[in-house]
Image (tube, rainbow, N blue to C red):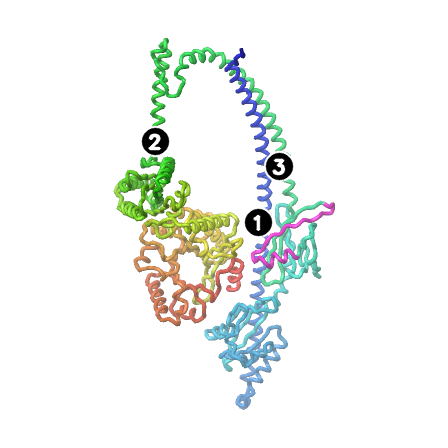
Amino acid sequence: MKQPVSLIRLLSLQILTLFVVLAVGSGVLVVYGLNETFKKESANLKTTLLNEQKALLQEEVYRALDYVRVEHSRIIRFAKEELLRESLQLHSMIESAYFSLDRETLRAGYVDAFLLQIVRAYNTHSFVEFAITSTEGVGIFHPKDLHYEGNDLRDLRDHQQTRVVNEELGMIAISDGGYLSTFWKDGEEVRQKITFIKRFDVKNWYFTASIYLDEFSKKIDKNLFEHLSSRRFGGREEGHFFINSFEGDLIISNGKVFNPRPNVWDMADANGIKVVQENSRIAQENEAGGFATYAWEDENGKLFSKVSFVAKIPHRDMFIGAEVNLDYIDAIIAKQRTLLENQITERIMMIIAIFILAVIVLLLFVAYLARRTKTNIQLFFNTFKNAANEQVEIPENALSFSEFQLLADGANRLIGKLKRQQQEAYYSASHDYLTGLPNRLLFYDRLELAIGNAKRAQDKIAIVFMDLDHFKRINDTLGHDIGDEVLVQVSKRLSKVIRETDTLARIGGDEFVFILTNIPKDEIVHEMINRMIRVVNKPLHVKKQTIRVGCSLGIAFYPEDGTDSDTLYKNADIAMYEAKSKGRNNFQCFNAKMEASLHGLLQLEQEISKGIKAGEFELYYQPKIKTDNGLIVGAEALLRWNHPTRGVLSPDAFIGVAEGSWLIYPLGEWVLENALSQLLRWQKRGWNLTVAINLSVKQIENPHFIDAVGASLRRFGVSPHLVEFEITESFSAENEQNIQALHQLKALGVHIAIDDFGTGYSSLSYLNKLPIDTIKIDRSFITHMLEHEDRLALVKVILQTAKILNLQTVAEGVESKEELEMLQYLGCCCFQGFYFSKPVPLPRFNSLVLGNQ
């Protein structure tokens, strides 16, 4: 006979074996976890350190470029002073010569030739280029462009399409003269020219004295290069600047200014990369600059990496860069690995000590437990062996001892309670806790049963997916208690609409699903759904609140739209989303096109989410110009998506999808943070510019939006009155929560503007309800307003209304000088449009501001 095994000993051995396995496994996991943590932390640290170095390089280069721009502004000032001096001297000579002529000479008709001879002689001895044009725009004297003489020059345009002579004529029409900045293409290079215009009344002429700015730049280049070569930065003060021309001439490197300048166009790193050629390409192709990493070999033959950031120098045929060594990053990683190895050794020793101590304690505990339980287990087993089956009550009269009878009585009560708990648990697991309706689990069971019955009887069934419209607003504005009561009342109403053979289930939130069986024709389902919409639309009275809700429904039929539960459920859900996209509070039947459309929307949502994380979004800035003096007073921040395959996308291509999902919140937060950050940099430069940020209605409806704006304003420390939020005219002025949110936003000190004004349904009461500072007149009224009297009349009415309400006005889409002059006449404050500039990247906008000062 086989020797029986002691249960206590077997359990003791199993516990001890399990403990050993767990201890060894835990040690392995600890070591593995430490190693994996080291890998991740090392990678993160390396990335962080590299990003810090890149940020430092970019900041230093941008700071150097700011210094170059400041020096460039000095060039403009010096150039203007030289032009004024030379012009006044020549004007004085011509004027004196003219008034010294006697009457006979004046009548003889030689005056023009005489005066032009004086200008020609003066022009040959001056580095300033002089020209003469009549006040009718006809060229009189243009020595470098003889074909201009005798021709009408009013349509003469520079590289930026500025009508130069028209601008000069406009300038002398209102004053004795002034300065004009233009840009001309010389070969492949665009050169900036500064011109001083001076009226010569006695001949109905005006003089222009011009000079190219790059001719002045050589005067300050020496000090500029010496200053940049001496700059050092970084934790070890080893970072330095270098400057090359786009042809490969070395100007600055390693703290030295080269004169003469050697050509290093073919200089290569340890991997054979042509360093100067690569830097030149990056600087020319990337307007904001770019990074490059290279491998170099020191005098001992050891390879080390360098990272650099390069950018084009404005108004120069050259680029500037900054670079630092990356060898210290590897040293930090190696030091961390040594610390990790010591840490692993300590952990292993600690685990071994704990394991030995735990084994001793466990052995003592098992021995004590075995002794105390062996007798009790034997007695308990003999007494209750006939009542071992689950939920079988123990017969108390079969027990001989009162103690066991008491134990049996307690056990029987426990069994009875377990039976009731199982019944309650089954009900709870299969029904919704709030409404008492079947939940998702029971719904799927009944759907599988309905599909099986329909398949056998060759019947038709319908799955209806219902979602309450804008239910989140009820929870956010009135509270979840009222929201729960709304769900209870709606479920009671819907339960009265369906038949006894149908199923109504709540599968979560404000989502309900119906199983409609025995459907002879589709019209019956349509009638039932129309009844559902009507009962949901009836006003609800909850805690003295009258609430109206709508619902969107989607229908999928068996077997046309699917033969299994998952497919039918999914297709009904897709049809419901189609109903929402078509205005809500309606129903739609599933078709295959809906699935393809939803898939496209989901794919675009995923691309937007990845684009936010990958930094693919960028802000363009469109200048806002004062109508009376042409000065840039602000910019509208406009979002652009640098899509990896589709190129630069405007908001029309993606903002609708973002507003239809949660993505509008991180996207709006990104725009706010970047716009305020740029506004802070403008303030530090002394530029008193405003920035306008477009808002979505969904952002305003977000209960956390106002606090987020206030926190951002405080964090960046910008002046709130320089921040303007734009809402579209479709903003609902009937929504009290939205109106209250705008007043709270206004209380932060920011300005609020209505965009695209005139295209919606605005009224005086609409304007009176909202805390508006500015009206932006839609471009559709400005375009061709001079050819259409009705458009011009509407613009006049809008401007008069704004004046009465003491509101600022901005005209959008100004594309011609004539439109601008009409807006000046009508008293419009500011304008935007292609006549001055389209939306441009930040570096181009900064250049426009510098040229506008």
Give the numbered dot on residue 336.
Answer: 3
Q: Give the residue at the far top of this rendering.
A: 400
Residue 296 shown in magenta: yes
Residue 625 position (above or below residue 536): below
Label 2 vs label 3, nearer the camera: 2
Residue 341 shown in magenta: no
In this rendering, does residue 675 appear at all?
yes
Residue visible at 62% across and 29% down in the picture: 345
User: Mark 1 — residue?
Assistant: 55
Q: Amino acid at mark 1?
A: Ala
Residue 437 position (above or below residue 811): above
Choose the circle earlier in sequence order: 2 or 1.
1
Residue 434: x and y in percent read 33, 36
The image quarter containing residue 733 is: bottom left
Residue 347: x and y in percent read 59, 28
Span colored in magenta: 277-301
Alpha-carbon distance for marks 2 and 3? Answer: 57 Å
Q: Give the residue at the far right of this rendering.
A: 300
Label 2 vs label 1, nearer the camera: 2
Residue 60: x and y in percent read 59, 52
Q: Secondary structure at mark 1?
A: helix
User: Mark 2 — residue?
Assistant: 427
Residue visible at 36% across and 45% down in the picture: 557
